[in-house]
Image (tube, helix red, strand yellow):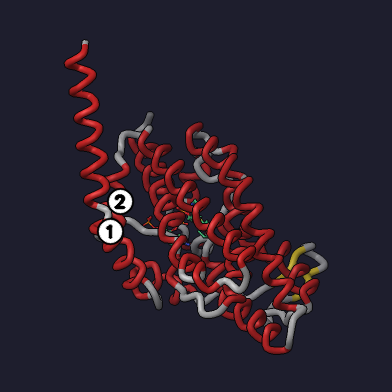
Amino acid sequence: MPAGYRKTLIRQIGQHAHSEIVGQLPEGNWITRAPTLERKAILLAKVQDEAGHGLYLYCAAETLGVSRDELTEKLLDGRMKYSSIFNYPTLNWADMGAVGWLVDGAAILNQVPLQRTSFGPYARAMVRVCKEESFHARQGFDVMRKMATGTPAQQKMAQDALNRLWFPALMMFGPSDAESTHSEQSMAWKIKMNSNDELRQKFVDQTVPQIEFLGLELPDAGIKWNEARGSYDYSDPDWSKFFDVIQGNGPCNVDRLAARNKAWKDGAWVRDGLLAHARKKAARKHAAE
Ligand code: FAQ
């Protein structure tokens, strides 16, 4: 395996894994405040799924010779990135709808083609991840539908969530193709199957009719159907804000990393206990042989 191919895969799979793990935080925040027992059970299951996705991805990265602990340490000290989207706060219950609908919706568009990526362990992890993500997106749309057809106050919350999360969701696909440093090589290696702008356009084309179905206002005055292209025109996100967020200056970057560092530190006794148990078991087995 060429060293560059391995390095690029470790970077992308590792960052993807970190995104799943950090991505639990904005939703985990709402588990205790979900409006009904059913919504709570659904949200809890979704957040657990994200943890599972992180684990499949760390396992896929391990097959490339990098341990989960090494990747985790790089996340915790800021040497590795995670998706920009998880550096925004989730302020009200409608945000749980918007996260499922827009964030998982964007994640699916990006991940479905990755089921055919050239590295088998990554492609196979994506098969199950995509199945689970489509349940997540549907539950998000269902929350959004309820809010958008609810009381005037609920409709306002739904619109506010859409307005705040629209451009951050567009940024999930990465910088414009002109500014994407890795796309050309990663597409040649089939680590990436589509360019960032291609997937972003697909997301806009898929989501605008859903916004209209919900009866919400479009979050961007630049959205217009372009007959000649057979696609929607839309405004570019403010890319200076995107680069600021991925450099650590988003609204929640400090909190997210602090939460992950605390969880790692607080969980040390569990890891130590499990290792001690495994060592004892191995020693007992060795003595019996
Ligand atoms: N955030 O040259 P490119 C989810 C960085 S999973 C932060 O275009 P590339 C599920 C990029 O790393 C979401 N950084 O990069 C869920 C590079 O910097 P570097 C995660 C970003 O890799 C839902 C630089 O910018 N999904 O949401 C971002 O070819 C709900 C130049 O960019 C994946 O990771 C960004 N958005 O393309 C969980 C999918 N975009 O590394 C919980 C797999 C770019 O040189 C709750 N990954 N950068 O320092 C990919 O498809 C690609 O890595 C892209 C970026 C498309 C994200």
Quadrant housing the N terminus: top left
Relative to 6, does residue 137 appear above or below in the rendering? Answer: below
Q: Position of residue 90 (x, y in %)?
A: 50, 75
Q: Quadrant of residue 102?
A: bottom right
At 20% from the left and 21% from the top, the residue drawn is: 284
Q: Name the foreground residue: 70 vs 1.
A: 70
Is residue 236 at all visible to an observer of this figure?
no
* Secondary element type, mark 2: helix
Q: Position of residue 229 (x, y in %)?
A: 77, 63
Q: Is mark 2 within 8 Å of ligand 1?
A: no
In the displayed orientation, state which residue is furthest to the right. Answer: 227
Question: Which mark is drawn over residue 76?
Answer: 1
Q: Name the foreground residue: 13 vs 269.
A: 269
Relative to 233, does residue 265 appear above or below in the rendering? Answer: above
Q: Which residue is mark 2?
A: 72
Task: Check disc 1 and give the amino acid type.
Answer: Leu
Dot 2, crowdedness within 10 Å: few (<14), some or many (≥20)? Answer: many
Dot 1, crowdedness within 10 Å: few (<14), some or many (≥20)? Answer: many
In the displayed orientation, state which residue is furthest to the top. Answer: 289
Q: Position of residue 101 (x, y in %)?
A: 64, 64
Task: Check disc 2 and give the amino acid type.
Answer: Thr
Q: Is residue 35 left or right of residue 284?
A: right
